[in-house]
Amino acid sequence: MLDDRTRVLVRRELQQIEKLLSEYDDLIESSRSIAPTLIEYTALGAVLQSFYNGVENIFQTIGKRVDGQIPAGESWHKDLLLQMGRKAESRKPVISRATLERLQPYLGFRHVSRHTYTFVLAWDKMQNLVWELRDVWNAVQADVELFLVLSE
């Protein structure tokens, strides 16, 4: 069972991610028909990174406050994602296996974008992540909302 504070923290992150995607909807949609400029796809890269950071904030909150632990070490980001896809002693899985698989490329992009210069980003390597972002977000949001309901 989740306490009220955990629910508030998770719902705040859900709202922040929705606001992020709403703010950039026009740019995301226009990138489907017109290749973005360097500045535009740099901004879209920041959106992808912010999106995954928001999702990871939700996972960290649940890991710390419900599971009582989050992974450590070099692969903690990947391990946290895997942790959220598994049932734990005190909870059901936070996300489905399908959603976990859809999030893996965003985790990979987050790693690359945080460890390289923005001018190195290549639109052809990130465009599908941008174009699928709303669908992936809908899956994450639905899974997390279901988790919240099942944890009442």
Image (cartoon, rainbow, N blue to C red):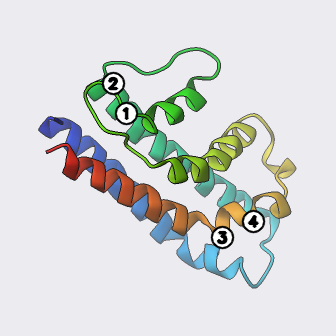
- Sequence-wise first label, 3 or 2: 2
Q: Is residue 52 above or below residue 34?
A: above
Residue 71 x %, y %: 49, 19
Please give the residue where the numbered disc 4 appears in the rendered image. Answer: 127
Q: Residue furthest bottom?
A: 33
Which one is in front, 118 or 48?
48
Q: Secondary structure at mark 1?
A: loop
> Is tag 3's residue or tag 1's residue first in the polypeptide sequence?
1
Q: CA distance from mark 3 to mark 1?
A: 30 Å
Q: Nearer the viewer, mark 3 or mark 1?
A: 1
The numbered mark, 2 or 1, whose residue comes first in the sequence reads: 2
Of badges 4 and 1, the one in the foreground is: 1
Local packing at callout 2 (Cα closer than 10 Å; few below 14, some 14-19, many 20+) is few
Q: Which mark is residue 131?
A: 3
Task: Identify the mark at residue 87; answer none if there is no mark.
Answer: 1
Q: Does label 4 or label 1 sit earlier along the sequence?
A: 1
The quadrant the N terminus occupies is top left
Q: Which residue is mark 2?
A: 64
Q: Secondary structure at mark 4?
A: helix
Q: Quadrant of the C terminus?
A: top left
The alpha-carbon separation of the residues under discs 2 and 1 comes to 15 Å
Residue 119 point in image, percent of width and height? 84, 51
Give the residue type at disc 1.
Lys
Which mark lies nearer to you, 2 or 1? 1
